[in-house]
Amino acid sequence: MANFDLVKMILNQLGKPESLISFVKDRLGHDRRYAIDSSFAQKELKWKPRKDFKEGLETTIQWYIDHQAWWQPLLERAERY
């Protein structure tokens, strides 16, 4: 999945317009895609994800929406440094 597609999924979940996306000039070494290969864990450890990516993303976003009182002070504290 391309980063752009992921950003659109997040905006959609938040009910935000794609017009919020701004493009920046690419940098040397800038990753266009991040991939995780879990085949080793699935094969050797008989592990499998509990949720598919889309469902996991939606669950994660909802958690952050529901728990702003947990993360907001961390954000404010980080701005002090």
Image (tube, rainbow, N blue to C red):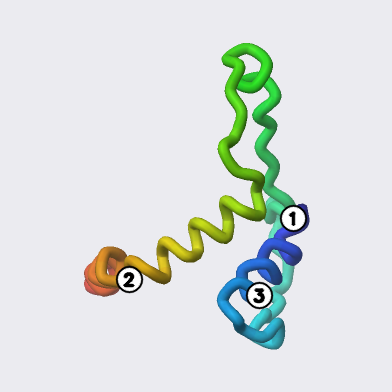
- Identify the image quadrant of residue 23: bottom right
Q: Residue at x 75, y 64 (%)?
A: 5
Q: Residue at x 68, y 55 (%)?
A: 30
- Name the kind of residue labelled 3 in the image: Asn
Q: Which residue is drawn at 41% across and 65% down?
A: 64
In space, the residues marked 2 and 1 are separated at their CA atoms by 30 Å
First of labels 2, 1 by sequence position:
1
Residue identifier under label 1: 32
At mark 3, the secondary structure is helix
- Name the kind of residue labelled 1 in the image: Arg
Q: Nearer the viewer, residue 21 or 12?
A: 12
Q: Nearer the viewer, residue 13 or 20?
A: 13
Residue identifier under label 3: 12
Residue 3: x percent and y percent?
A: 71, 60
Q: Is residue 2 visible?
A: yes
- Identify the image quadrant of residue 45: top right
